[in-house]
Image: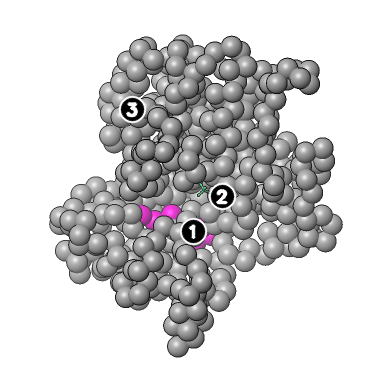
Amino acid sequence: MINEKLKQEDLKYIWHPCSQMKDYENNLPLIPIQSAKGVYLKDYENNQYIDSISSWWVNIFGHQNRYINKKIKKQLNTLEHVIFAGFTHKPAINLAKRIINITPKGLDKVFFADNGSSGIEVALKMSFHYHKNLGKIKPKFVSLKNSYHGETMGALAVGDVELYKDTYKNIIIDTIQTPAPKDQTKKSANIAIKKVEKLFKKYHEEISSIIIEPLIQCAGYMKMYHPIFITKLRILCDKYDIHLIADEVAVGFGRSGTMFAIEQAKVSPDFMVVSKGLTGGYLPLALTLTTQKIYDAFYCNYGEYKAFLHSHSYTGNAIACACANAVLDIFEKEDIINKNQKKIKYISKQLKRFKNLDNVLEIRQTGFIAAIELKGYSSDQRINLTIYKEALKNGIFIRPLGNVVYFMPPYVIKKQEIKRVFDTLFEILVKIS
Ligand SMILES: Cc1ncc(COP(=O)(O)O)c(C=O)c1O
């Protein structure tokens, strides 16, 4: 009963994200969470749910991680926050230094923002502004079809998921979308790169940058592609004086199997945006990294009007920075990227049995992200909702994207918990086939 009471109270006051609020009347559960530990979320009636999607892909080292908690508490006792214009602090300096050390070569400067979308806005504005400072007006941005970069106006404009974008098409800036590779083969990557080349050839004088989600279009139904696409894209960007923006908001920090997905393409972008896993799912923080060359184009005497005057009140929040430093400590001390490989293999093994199901169209995996695309269901059937509710009944929190069921858990998940999620999912898919 306490769950229901809290739900009713919540609905009286709160407007939830990414929801049709009326759905919460009958169709959609709204579960008040009392506490969480590791991969488990616990409601007020002591039901537990495995957080199979890391609470929107942010939580990488489990809920209530002892080490992160300790580091946040320590920071809380010294400095919570200070204005970041004209002031600085050690947690931000350490974080900037460390992130530069672990990201691709050539990314030498860090700008702080406070969520993925705002980090993307920074990259887009900086890219345009860089060209402007050099005397070129390049008002166009290119992105891939089916991409997702966030929900603020600029981020939405470079996104291409109809569901989120269509309503606002009259009020967002005009951008160009080019086809993404249609699958993980090299052949598809090469087909897509040819389209990019054609586009760049024609419009390069107007294009500031191209923004991509390296290897995995997460919100775009977990579509995946081959790294060769990015390797070749880098060459085209250099040839046509167009910036390459790597949006690593979702795929950064080990999700793709490597620390950053773009590493697999063996190239460096001109901008890289990180967020989500950066604070292990604790606090909002984003970083936009860029090159010395781009930074230098803004560097001049006061009054020449080249400075990047973008700001957010919570820029460089000290607690969030301390938290991110704790996350980087864990990566270093526990050799997470190497250790994750075993679990990644185990996930592949678990996926195999789904191939033979009648209602499965395709299985995809890159690193710690697995996706099962279903077939034979119309959107009116809302099969995602059926799966979501059925999984919850079995203590699993999984949140399909349309007809795509995906698994993106915290790295601390144990093998037996991985198995439990896939066993449950298998039973559900058999039941609804
Ligand atoms: C690739 C990508 N970029 C940007 C964002 C936006 O991040 P945020 O939700 O923190 O604004 C997301 C969010 O899911 C994302 O997946």
Q: Secondary structure at mark 2?
A: helix
Q: Residues within 10 Å of mark 2 (few under 14, many from 20)?
A: many
The amino acid at mark 2 is Gly
Q: Nearer the viewer, residue 234 or 171?
A: 171
The amino acid on which the numbered mark 1 sits, given as a three-letter code, is Ser
Q: Which residues lie in the magenta part?
A: 406-413
Q: CA distance from mark 3 to mark 2?
A: 28 Å
Amino acid tagged 3? Thr
Mark 3 Cα-neighbour bin, 10 Å: few <14, some 14–19, many ≥20: some
CA gap, disc 3 to disc 1? 30 Å
The first of marks 3 and 2 along the sequence is: 3
Which residue extends farthest bottom? Answer: 1
Q: Give the mark nearer the N terminus: 1 vs 2.
A: 1
Q: Residue at x 42, y 22 (%)?
A: 233
- The answer to which image quadrant residue 185 occupies is top left
Can you tell which mark lies on residue 277?
2
Q: Is residue 368 above or below residue 288?
A: below
